Amino acid sequence: MSDVVQTIASFLEAVHPYDSLPRDELVRVAGCFSRREVPAGTTLYAAGEPAEGLFLLKRGGVEVLDPSGGLVSLLSARNSFGERGLLRDGLAVTTARTTEDSVVLMLPEAEFRHLIAEYPAFDRFFNRGRGGEGRKTDLTTLKVADLMARKPVTCGPDTPVREAAALMRDAHVSSLGVTEGERLVGIVTVRDLSNRVLAEGRDPNAPIRAVMTADPVALTPDALGSDILHIMLERRIGHLPVVEAGQLVGMVTQTDLTRFQAVSSAVLIRDVAGAETVAEMAAVTARIPQLLVQLVGGHHAHEVVTRLITDIADAVTRRLLDLAEAELGPAPVPYLWLACGSQGRQEQTGVSDQDNCLMIDDAATEADMEYFARLARIVSDGLNACGYVYCPGDMMATNPRWCQRVRTWRDYFRGWIAKPDPEAQMLASVMFDLRPIGGAASLFANLQHETLEAAARNSIFVAHMIANSLKHTPPLGLIRGFATIRSGEHRNHIDLKHNGVVPVADLARVYALRGRLGAVNTRARLIEAEAAGVISVSGARDLIEAYDLIAAMRLENQAALVKSGRKPDNFLAPSDLSDFERSHLRDAFVVVRTMQSAAGHGKGALT
């Protein structure tokens, strides 16, 4: 094996989904990549031109632009791009241009298609799709249970027609299930009220049984979307009850199908990019809960779901920056808007606040700083209006502390590393998750490298960061149970954010620090930490599997809340889980707690 192939293979071991390949196959694939060193400002491919292959950024930065020149995304090391053209008609649908001197790997189209066909991990990852979220989200193959938008609204057969109509109006539904006890006996729709009551002059006080469709055709939750389509088309109906063991559990309508087909991350990003006002963007982000339900129902990996949802937040932020500059005029000096927290890690779910900051070129004058204070306010207020609520800890660019010249940021990081008091630990934990969103990414590149190097060399700072990472612990009870919340609104629940995914994110951040690893995403950090030998193979794999289970369960719980008509949150009642699910969730928490203990005793690399 040549040195070049060996280097590429080592790099691929820390990049998903290549990390799932058998070792021999990974080495073979590494030999198929071509390697290019390209200067800043190089166009790698342009929209409308034939797609060359799949690109993978090894070092540097790339901006992806839509056909009109609008920014779609900013990419960093380990990001793939160019697959859209390969998965569509062979023509690139975007333009990719380097933002700094970069090293780019390119996999030929034929090899890319081979991997898609032969390895499910590649199929799932790349067919997550920007236009339909992948094959598993195909309407025809989804289960009926994943298409039900809300709990059914019902009435008894003796309910007066007038009351049934009022019930539909107040619940904003177009149909009612008519039940006796728990058994479905009929269905009535708005169309029935129009055709069978108004058009025929019937008494509005007559019982609903007189106008309902008795013993309607129904489906079970495990039926497929194709069954819905076939029945609706054959029988020319727009509402289908879903019945399990004789009990009405849901209703699927043509509106549900239309909503499903109209919601995808690509559609939402397109609509955000075309929005002219904050209100228009807020209308788009209001559809994110439905996208969450759709993606979870499609059984996508949690890291794909959160990446797609975060992409929308990134697009909203960049559009707000555009609107701010349109209002204030061009920026007087280069600047960079960065996200931290879950957006920085590309781990946003159905509920997220905003965490952000501004880095400004050192040439900025005091008058220039006034400009950026106004820009920060426009963007932050816009994010809040779009559902990304203000950070409770004021970790936002509107806080003058987090809207500073690069030299001030450099002083911040140096100070936190030199004097790691509790506040410094907290701030460093947040700021190590920074990710550029819009502006001049070069303002952060050197600072990130310098900070990682300085922090990793300071053993006292690392020790404090390890201690800080142990503050959030898994909710383990004393005897094979869970330590649930004891009082308040979420009594008898566990917090899958602060006691579930956060402990893993905190550990992954420490591993990245110790290994001088540039990844920000939690799962990517764990994979890189394993490859760099910061933690053992067995420890890394156990922790990744535990994290996958906890993060997936968090998303499934949020999707279930949305489907029940509630807002998504991070609280789960263990009593809602099966014995099997409770056992596996507890085992995952035990793995996390074990890894925390090892880190606390200085054995993280030996676990």
Image (tube, helix red, strand yellow):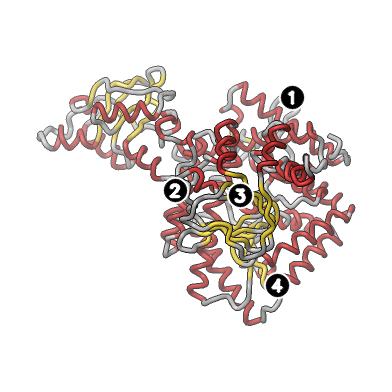
Within 10 Å of disc 2 (Cα), the crowding (few <14, some 14-19, many 20+) is some
Residue 590 picture location, percent across and down: 74, 30
CB atoms of marks 3 and 2 within 8 Å: no
Q: Quadrant of residue 271?
A: bottom left
Residue located beneath label 1 in the image: 479
Q: Amino acid at mark 3?
A: Phe
Q: CA distance from mark 4 to mark 1?
A: 53 Å
User: For the residue labelled by badge 2, is the local secondary structure a helix, a strand or a loop?
Assistant: loop
Looking at the picture, tell me which residue is in the foreground, 562 or 318: 318
Judging depth in this view, the residue of 211 and 300 nearest the camera is 300
Picture coordinates of residue 107, whole percent (x, y): 62, 45
Callout 4 environment at 10 Å: few (<14), some (14 to 19), or many (20+)?
A: some
Residue at the extreme left of the image, as rendered: 201
As drawn, the residue found furthest toward the front would be 2
Circles 1 and 3, Cβ within 8 Å, touching? The answer is no
Question: Which kind of residue does numbered mark 2 sit on?
Answer: Arg
Eyeballing the image, is 505 above or below 209? Answer: below
Query: What amino acid type is highlighted by mark number 1?
Result: Ile
Q: CA distance from mark 2 to mark 4?
A: 36 Å
Label annotation for residue 405: 4
Q: Secondary structure at mark 1?
A: loop
Q: Earlier in the sequence, mark 3 or mark 2?
A: 3
- Using the image, tell me which numbered label, if any, was put on residue 83: none
Amino acid type of the residue tagged 4 in the rendering: Arg
Residue position marked by numbered label 3 in the rendering: 55
Residue at point 74%, 58% (across, down): 427
On the image, the x and y values in percent for residue 147 come to 42, 34
Image disc number at residue 287: 2
